[in-house]
Every structure is written in structure tokens, then in C-alpha cells.
Amino acid sequence: MNMYAKELLEQLKKEKLLSKENLVYLIDHREEVREEAAKTARTLGDRYYGKSIYPRGLVEFTNYCRNNCYYCGIRAGNRNVKRYRLSKEEILQACENGYEIGYRSFVLQGGEDPYFHIDRMEEIVAAIHERYPECAITLSIGELNREQYQRLFDAGANRYLLRHETADEKHYRMLHPDSMSLAYRKQCLYDLKEIGYAVGTGFMVGSPFQTTEHIAKDLLFIKKLDPQMVGIGPFVPHHDTRFKDEPAGTVELTVFLLSLIRIMKPNVLLPATTALGTIDPEGREKGILAGANVMMPNLSPVMVRKNYELYDNKICTGEEAAESKKTQSERMKAIGYYLDFCRGDYKEDEIEPERSTNGH
């Protein structure tokens, strides 16, 4: 029995932070503390959000991208992708379909597509906000400048997802072309926070060349940034990338890291990602039982879902689709949770731990 790993978990519970070296040790010796970490994470998540799992209706509106990230199936250099763009009307119809089902939170996600320049995106966001003023609008459209982020915020967007993917400069260079900059990506995240967005970041688990030290750096960057949301998922290779033969990340490590993130930041909004469900049919349930409390079912038109293929075998029809509300509700109920179709806003204030009443 590894008592030091247990001591480190106890320290993390109390202080919500460990040194990089201690995080590395805890992750490398996670077998002893996995169940305790998951139990603690669930308790903390329940304290803030109860048994609610918040679905976000995902609209993948373009698979064009100007970037060439080496791991991504829709990167600019992949000529085998069947490209598509949804029109403004198609995006609004997807939101309407979701609204009728019960969604009050929409996520617009796409590659960094020059066609959707700032004027066009501003118009789309404003139209959604005008039609559904009570709904949350999340954008996940990559790196923009501060003025552009401000314009989209003013148009009605209130959340932004921008995964940093890796917080280590050398590792970042192994995954991205020279035209991209980790420093700039981090600056985008700080700009978004200062403007007033609820910000989400995150990283791939098990990406090529990743070490435990890289993961520890990711956790420390997340702690420093203090985002409202953190999205992590296992790396899944795509057949048209240089990493096609690399092994996928594991559910086991991903769900343990979900638990650590929940313990480090108890009020965070934490998705059980599609990638988890892709490599394990029960992956998202495992994520929720480890501390996650958000899901992102797909609202995109069925005809384009298969073309937004960031990685191989992405689940995009059937139970993954947003329409299958009944099936998803039953799956959540089976593990003691329920789908809560409200906006699912971030709980800003930290809640004091419950105190013992043993005669004190």
C-alpha cells in the first residue's frame, strides 16, 4: 500500500494544490487512490450542483480550418475531408430544434474558418441571442484578437471554450506547426477572462509524446488561469494525420484527472466528453462518476455530423445525438444523476465544507 500517494491526495483535498513533483508522483501512483479521489470529486460536485448533469447543445457549424494541428482530422492540409459550412439559417434551425427539445445552452463550434469572419459571426450570435435571450451561448471558434472577442461578447455570447491542449512549450511544438503559438493561445484565454466570458480550457490526455510532467504542468496552468470550465478528453488518433498509429489515451487516466481537477477546483463545470464515449461505450458515465457534470450532445444537422471528424470513430449518430433525450436521461438515472436542461451556470462562490457536528 502506497501511503505517500494517500497523503498527497489528503493534502490536495485540503490545499487544492500540489507542487509539480507531487502531482507527478500522485498521477504515477494513482492506483491506490483512484476510488477515494472519485468519491471525493463526486461529493464536491454534488455540493455545488446536486445531481444535475447539464447538457449543452453542440452545433458544429463548419469543418473548414486554416490551422494544421498535427493531430486533427479537419486540419487545413487534410484533402480527404468532405468540407461543409452551415448557413446562418441552418445554425438557427439547429438551435430551434434544440430549444424545442429543452436545451437552454448552445455551443457553436467550428474550425478557424475565414469565411466566418467577425462580422458574420457577430450577426449569427446576435440573432441567436435575440431569439433566445434566456439561453447561454458558448463559442468554440479558436484564436481571435481581443477586439473580436469583445464584439462577440457584446453581441450576446457569454461563454468561450479554448483548450490550451498542452501547457508545455516543447510539447506544444511537437503537436502544432510553427505558425501557431502557445503564448498567444494563453493570452487569448486571459483576454477572454478579462472581457467577462465564462472561460473553458483543457487538454488532451495521452497525446503523442506526453509525459506525466506535461500533465502536471497542465493542471498547474489550469489552477493559475482559474477557468469556469475545463474540458479534457483522451487523445484519439485520426487515420489522415501523422499520429495515425499512435495509441489512444485511456479512459482510466482521463477519469482520474477529472477527479483531480474537481478536487483542485470544486465548483468547476466539467464535461464528460464525446471522446470518452468514443473509446468506451460507458466512458461518459465513468467520467460523471469521477466528478464530471456536463455533456455536449450533438445538435448539428444529421447530414454533416460524420464530416466533423476530429478523430476516428467519433460517435455522431444514435444515442450521441441530442434528439435521444429519453435514452440519455435513462443512462444518467441509472448512475444516480439526471439531465438538467437549464442554462447550468457556473457557481461563482466557493461553498464551505460541511463541518462535523460531533459535539462541536
Image (tube, rainbow, N blue to C red):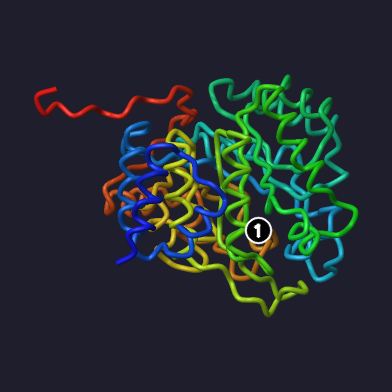
- In the picture, the quarter occupied by the N terminus is bottom left
Q: Which of 263 and 23 is in front in this view?
A: 23
Give the answer, above or below, for where 191 lies relative to 232: above
x and y percentages locating residue 6 in the rendered image: 34, 55
Query: Considering the numbered disc 1 on the image, is that residue within a helix, a strand or a loop?
Result: helix
x and y percentages locating residue 167 in the rendered image: 69, 50
For label 1, the residue is 303
Q: In which quarter of the image is residue 123?
A: top right
Identify the residue at horizontal 26%, vertical 28% (top origin).
Answer: 354
Identify the residue at horizontal 69%, vertical 58% (top origin).
Answer: 308
- In the picture, the quarter occupied by the C terminus is top left
Q: Nearer the viewer, residue 211 or 319?
A: 211
Q: Nearer the viewer, residue 184 or 294?
A: 184
- 170 lies left or right of 47: right
Name the amino acid type tagged 1: Met
- Can you name the residue that lies furthest to the right here? 179
x and y percentages locating residue 113 in the rendered image: 83, 47
Q: How crowded is mark 1: few (under 14 residues within 10 Å), some or many (20 or more)?
A: few
